Image: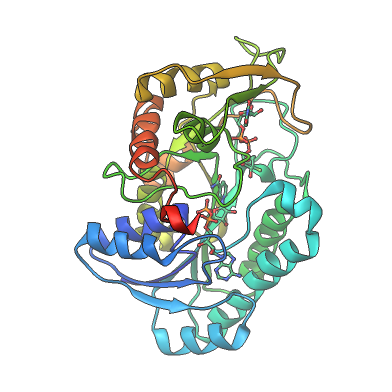
Amino acid sequence: MRILVTGAAGFIGSHTALALLTAGHEVVSFDNYSNSSQESLARVEKLAGESLERVDGDLRDFSALESLLKSGSFDVVVHFAGLKAVGESVEKPLLYYENNVSGTINLLRAMQLAACRKLVFSSSATVYGEVEMNPILESFPLSAVNPYGATKLMIEDICRDLAKSEAGWNIALLRYFNPVGAHESGEIGEDPIGIPNNLMPFVMQTAVGRHKQVNIYGNDYPTPDGTGVRDYIHVVDLANAHSRAVEKIDSFAGAEAVNLGTGQGSSVFELLAAASKAVGTEIPHSIAARRPGDAAAVWADAELAKKKLGWTAERDLDAMCRDHWRWQSKNPNGFRTESEC
Ligand code: NAD
Ligand code: UFG
């Protein structure tokens, strides 16, 4: 198939582009590199032994999308492009609504004009809002707790309304839990700009000496060891799920949501122990106050993904830490060289 991948240079996009190329698909990347580097695409090509087509462009530029979709003859669009930092979304809500929501409306309009109605969209477990019960089923109520989450929920709603308004749309709304890890080669991985908010990149950057210690945000949660529990999922498993979604896109009637998680929760202490094992030394840490807005525990019910995509996550927390560490230790400054930092 010929597939347009927006945000292909980013963390999940690059791993998915590699999975799609490896599965024999043609991949066209569309990215503005606002949170990524072209080097990741070069490495994807090297790993795949295949090239992809690069289009440098911005979702906010409707005419660029219109001409790309009209001339591109795409079978499916896989849409990763978006901004994803929760804190930044609180400070700059208009940037997030414009980039993520208006950008996606542009993409959907361009797809509609080109009669390309098959879409795989990066949603997030954030659409479940304040979590009260686990495991989380796709049928649980949805709400937004910050502007970033609101953009994901709005885009889901827009997709559902669009699919109701016009026959022929097949839209997979994939709700990721906590993506971590890296390709086992250590050549591509997550390259956060600035200080990461998320646990795994912060842990791994601490292991290479970029931070003094990991702050554990609370050890008094109602969880087995008192620290927060999340459903971490290896990015290669996630990428393979996208490959499946592309292949099975016709089975998505209108717009349908599917959780992508392992179905198992791990605590901050468990992740730190697995990371220390992978790194080979204890990672310095200390207990800090709870982070406002954090849930005690969040994990997916992963049954629908098994049923609909024939997919289950295969890699455990040890593999996630081992592969993330290989990437971090081989690329302590991510895709940047020492002089670019
Ligand atoms: P990322 O920042 O690494 O990748 C996003 C890519 O989109 C980047 O290459 C960026 O340059 C590009 N981009 C952003 N705005 C653009 C625009 N206006 N035009 C063109 N390109 C643009 O993020 P990621 O972790 O790979 O996440 C991919 C998607 O998955 C995002 O939509 C994110 O919200 C969603 N998601 C991520 C997580 C996570 O924890 N990583 C969890 C749930 C959902
Ligand atoms: N944590 C720490 N120390 C840190 C960072 C995180 O103890 O330095 C803890 C958090 O309190 C939480 C766990 O580690 O218990 C995971 O935190 P992350 O920030 O890695 O992930 P979250 O589950 O909080 O957030 C992620 C995405 C959000 C998304 C949310 C809900 O980053 O974009 O899942 O789906 F909104």
Q: Is residue 184 above or below residue 150?
A: above
Q: Which one is in front, 178 or 57?
A: 57
Label tally: 0
Q: Looking at this view, name the residue that lies furthest to the front.
A: 339
Residue 19's x, y, as percent? 31, 55
Residue 24's x, y, as percent? 23, 64
Q: Dividing the picture into quarters, in which one does residue 96 lie?
A: bottom right
Pick the quarter of the image with the N terminus: bottom left
Q: Dividing the picture into quarters, in which one does residue 277 lie?
A: top left
Can residue 302 be seen here? The reply is: no
At x 46%, y 52%, the residue is 11
At x 65%, y 67%, the residue is 164
At x 61%, y 68%, the residue is 163
Residue 56's x, y, as percent? 47, 78
195 sits to left or right of 151: left
110 sits to left or right of 234: right
Residue 112's x, y, as percent? 56, 81
At x 31%, y 58%, the residue is 18
